[in-house]
Image (cartoon, helix red, strand yellow):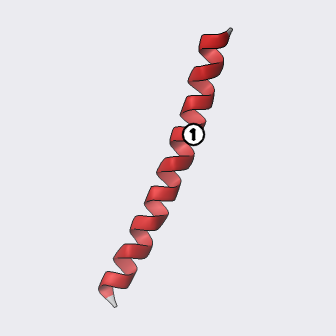
Amino acid sequence: MERKIQSLLAKKIYKNRAKVENFYHLVTGNAQNE
């Protein structure tokens, strides 16, 4: 049970981190282009 919760949390964190990194790349990319 505990392992299942941990894997769900890990997936959630990974997804959120990917979103943040994509956003960061968009922002920094736009800053460099202008």
1 relative to 20 in the view: left or right: left
Residue found at the very far top of the displayed protein = 34
The relative height of residue 30 versus residue 9 in the rendered view (above or below) is above
Above or below: residue 34 compared with residue 17: above
Residue at 61 percent across and 26 percent down: it is 27
Residue 18, horizontal then vertical, whole percent: 51, 48
Give the residue furthest to the right.
34
**Which residue is at a point 35% across and 75% down the rendered structure image?**
6
Q: Secondary structure at mark 1?
A: helix
x and y percentages locating residue 24 in the rendered image: 55, 32
**Residue with the mark numbered 1:** 22
Can you say which quadrant of the picture contains the C terminus? Answer: top right
Q: Quadrant of the N terminus?
A: bottom left
6 vs 29, left or right, is: left
Q: Is residue 30 left or right of residue 9?
A: right
Q: What number of labels is visible?
A: 1
Q: Hey, which residue is sitting farthest left in the picture?
A: 3
Q: Amino acid at mark 1?
A: Asn
Pointer 1: residues within 10 angstroms few (<14), some, or many (20+)? few
Q: Position of residue 32 (x, y in %)?
A: 59, 12
| Residue 26 in the image: above or below residue 11 | above
Determine the residue positioned at 37% across, 83% down: 4
**32 lies above or below 5:** above
* Residue shown at 31% from the left, 82% from the top: 3
- Please indicate whether residue 21 sits to the left or right of residue 7 in the image: right
